[in-house]
Amino acid sequence: MHNDHDISDRLASYADVLAGELPGAWTSSLVPADAKDDLAELADRIWDLDLVAASLAEHPLQQAALLTRPDGAQLVLLDRHDEREGFLIAAVAPRALPDEAYRAVPEPNGIALADDPFLSAEQVAGDLLARYDTALAQVRTNILGGTQPSQTDRIVLTWQVDGSVATAPVDHRADEILRAHGFVQDPQDGIYRLRGDDTQAQARALREIGPQLEAISIGIGLQHSAGRTATTAVPASAPPAPAGARTPSVRGR
């Protein structure tokens, strides 16, 4: 019979392997049984109304492994509490966002994993992670007041009223490109923002990210904030006009 220490070691080891096999730079950490406050806070943020929620209703969270991506996305790995080997895994909702951010966003419900982290990584990447990234983009778009979320093959840039540009990319491959060109990610909501106080630098950054994103098969769309226009394509070689050059007629076109 396994003791609690053996179970914790097995959970932590599985999470370590799984994190290393997922696309992107994931890390894992164990949330032990004695971290009561952390477990309670984590349980409240588990983004699930199906399999994992049903399990937690019968078996409150006693320990977990947390997988974290540099952009703030998190997955939680927990025990199955049934006769089968393996674990449950679920998405974790961002911290401290208003309820309206989740408006009309389907929960990226969790899934059951077999006792093989290598095969499970393929299952997570092709199913849960894809749904989670889409849900995150929709939540962040709601925060922006935008009308269309980014997609895996297309980033939507949204002009803000202060002249900055904001985006919530779905594909983690875009993150490094955005950061390299001055976009700064908000640790609270995960949104990337490019300031507009230097319009020449802003225009140059937007011009340069186009070809780099296209090289990894990601297109760009541009939209104004809520109440403005629908998304339009932004050619890599012809970025939108910098904030200082936009006129009311352009913004409301």
Image (spheres, grey):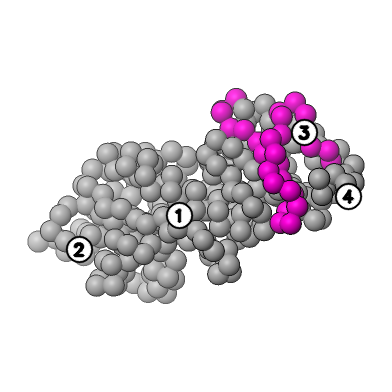
Q: Earlier in the sequence, mark 2 or mark 4?
A: 2
Q: Which residue is mark 1?
A: 74
**Chain part drawn in magenta:** 215-242
Residue 77 in the image: state x and y as whole percent: 33, 56
Residue drawn 71% across the image and 29% down it = 235
Of helix, strand and loop, which mostly describes the magenta segment? loop
Q: How far separated are the C-alphas under marks 2 and 4?
A: 60 Å
Query: Relative to 62, is 242 above or below?
Result: above
Q: Nearer the viewer, mark 1 or mark 3?
A: 3
Residue placed furthest toward the front: 253
Residue underneath mark 3: 239
Q: How crowded is the residue under tag 4: few (<14 C-alpha within 10 Å), some, or many (20+)?
A: few
Where's the N terminus, which quadrant?
bottom left
Q: CA distance from mark 2 to mark 3?
A: 53 Å
Q: Residue 20: tell me if it is visible.
A: no
In the rendered structure, which disc, 2 or 3, sits on the residue that comes first in sequence? 2
Left/right of residue 106 with respect to residue 87 in the rendered view: right
On the image, numbered disc 2 is attached to which residue? 81
Give the label on residue 25, or none: none
